[in-house]
Image (cartoon, rainbow, N blue to C red):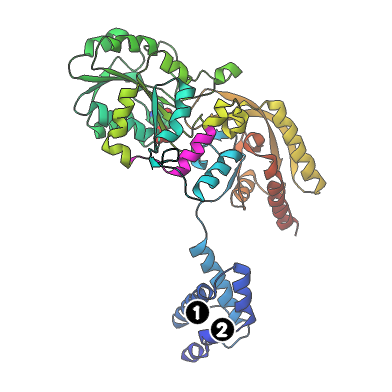
């Protein structure tokens, strides 16, 4: 063993080999980083030799350098690969919470790159050369789109809810219907966030029914707010009733100190119900119906970046902007740039440029055409996969419109040497990762959320799997 250790070539000798130089160029590394990785690999091998568990080529062998480089390549992948990966979402869930919710449109990405790759007027008024406010950027568009007097943007809707409760209802009472005490995504509960904010939750009504009188009875001097929460990820059926926005707005108008706030969850700016999809409230309507304040997410049905949007009466929003927490929860230029461009698409009635809207409103025939085209491309490749078109459903996801099922066509894909689960896993572990779903013993590809530009990558991945199998 001692003998073997002595025979390990010194690092400076390894650095002169062809293999080392090839390692540098193929992995696109600097000399120093490559040398460090080789040093670490040799140290690792040395320990294994000492512990008599090294089963690779011996140091005197010509193959030794190959073993070192293989290990160094592995270490490089372990230590220097990025964690956030692109994923092709063929799962059929559009706002997939685990896959980053809404993807951004081309012009949105371009605007973000333009703004962030140089200095910008984030807090500067170019017109008069004075310090400006970052709140100004998306506000104009939000006001225009929602009809609200004022608006601001924070980190996400959970942050919006927290800021609103802390700033406007700390140590005071907030009345919420028992039917609306929701939990979203496992980590956001209205009751918990309320407790955290210092506001006192006053539950009214029952799980299935809440009436106007229930609210009326609980209003007193301690009441700061009536809060209505969109049920988002569940639906109540049967013997149910809740109090409408208009009615609650009218009730709160009778009390000067009481604010009526509605947490809309998704907060749609686009009327999906016009297209026969769900019955999600449109933000503008809720404001018209008299809500003093609303908040909603930027990356759910809106189709923008992660953000929480607060809109409503000017004096209330202005007081939120001045709160210490507003600084804590403020968003970066990247978010504002992405949000601003997404909102501009709505203003210009170019909603098709927002991928989430485009994907949700795609017709099933459009998806059929795309599926047939991918199948034709695959057949040309002489692949050993068997394909079939089947009818099915896509989902909106992101905890919104839980009842809505969007008609779609799916590609059912099968290989006689793989189980569905094996193929599902191979696609997931490929580069890029392709997320499919297994339903009724079929492996299904839903192209609703896949761009034509991604076909080539899917074909390449399938080709690689095919080659491995027939080899
Ligand atoms: C999704 C949701 C939230 C949380 O929004 P994020 O943007 O994910 O922080 C809060 N309230 C409701 C009703 C929601 O649906």
The region drawn magenta spans 329-342
The answer to which quarter of the image holds residue 65 is: bottom right
Q: Position of residue 288 (x, y in %)?
A: 43, 14
The residue located at (34%, 18%) in the rendering is: 207
Above or below 267: residue 44: below
Split into quadrants, the picture shows ligand 1 in the one at top left
Q: CA distance from mark 2 to mark 1?
A: 10 Å
Is disc 1 surrounded by few (<14), some (14 to 19) or many (20+) residues within 10 Å? many
Tell me if the residue at label 1 has its CB under 8 Å from ligand 1: no
Decide if residue 17 is in sight here: yes
Q: Position of residue 210 (x, y in %)?
A: 33, 12
- Total numbered labels: 2
Q: What's the magenta bit mostly, secondary-structure-wise? A: helix
Which numbered disc, 2 or 1, marks the residue closer to the eye? Answer: 2
- Left/right placement of residue 217 relative to residue 228 reads left
Q: Which mark is residue 42?
A: 1
- Left/right placement of residue 340 relative to residue 131 reads right
Q: Which residue is mark 2?
A: 14
- Left/right placement of residue 242 relative to residue 42 reads left
- Left/right placement of residue 63 relative to residue 318 reads right
Decide if residue 185 is in sight here: no
The residue located at (74%, 56%) in the rendering is: 467
Above or below 295: residue 250: above
The answer to which quarter of the image holds residue 297 is: top left
Q: Position of residue 387 (x, y in %)?
A: 74, 39
């Amino acid at each position: 063993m001692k003998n073997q250790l002595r025979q390990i070539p010194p690092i400076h000798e390894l650095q002169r080999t062809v293999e080392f130089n090839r390692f540098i160029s193929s992995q696109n590394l600097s000399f120093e980083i490559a040398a460090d990785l080789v040093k670490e690999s040799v140290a690792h091998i040395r320990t294994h030799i000492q512990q008599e568990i090294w089963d690779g080529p011996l140091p005197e062998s010509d193959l030794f350098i190959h073993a070192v480089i293989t290990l160094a390549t592995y270490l490089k992948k372990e230590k220097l690969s990025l964690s956030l990966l692109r994923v092709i979402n063929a799962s059929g869930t559009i706002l997939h919470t685990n896959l980053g919710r809404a993807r951004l449109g081309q012009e949105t990405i371009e605007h973000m790159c333009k703004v962030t790759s140089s200095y910008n007027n984030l807090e500067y008024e170019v017109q008069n050369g004075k310090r400006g406010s970052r709140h100004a950027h998306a506000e104009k568009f939000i006001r225009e789109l929602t009809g609200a007097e004022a608006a601001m943007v924070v980190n996400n809707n959970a942050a919006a809810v927290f800021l609103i409760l802390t700033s406007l209802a700390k140590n005071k009472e907030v009345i919420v219907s028992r039917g609306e005490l929701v939990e979203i995504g496992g980590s956001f509960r209205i009751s918990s966030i309320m407790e955290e904010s210092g506001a006192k939750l006053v539950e009214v009504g029952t799980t299935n029914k809440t009436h106007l009188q229930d609210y009326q009875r609980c209003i007193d001097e301690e009441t700061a707010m009536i809060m209505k929460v969109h049920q988002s990820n569940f639906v109540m059926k049967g013997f149910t009733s809740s109090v409408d926005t208009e009615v609650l707005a009218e009730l709160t108008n009778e009390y000067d100190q009481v604010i009526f706030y509605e947490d809309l969850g998704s907060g749609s700016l686009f009327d999906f119900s016009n297209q026969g999809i769900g019955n999600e409230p449109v933000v503008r309507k809720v404001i018209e119906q008299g809500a003093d304040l609303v908040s909603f997410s930027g990356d759910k049905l809106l189709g923008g970046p992660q953000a929480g949007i607060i809109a409503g009466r000017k004096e209330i929003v202005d007081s939120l902007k001045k709160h210490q927490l507003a600084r804590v929860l403020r968003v970066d230029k990247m978010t504002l740039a992405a949000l601003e461009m997404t909102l501009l698409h709505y203003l210009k009635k170019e909603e098709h440029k927002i991928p989430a809207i485009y994907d949700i409103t795609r017709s099933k025939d459009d998806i059929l055409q795309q599926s047939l085209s991918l199948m034709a491309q695959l057949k040309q490749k002489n692949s050993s996969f068997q394909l079939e078109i089947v009818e099915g459903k896509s989902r909106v996801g992101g905890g919104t419109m839980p009842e809505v099922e969007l008609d779609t066509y799916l590609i059912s894909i099968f290989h006689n040497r793989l189980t569905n689960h094996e193929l599902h896993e191979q696609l997931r572990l490929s580069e890029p990762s392709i997320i499919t779903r297994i339903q009724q013993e079929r492996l299904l590809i839903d192209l609703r959320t896949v761009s034509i530009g991604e076909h080539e990558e899917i074909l390449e991945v399938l080709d690689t799997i095919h080659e491995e199998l027939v080899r």
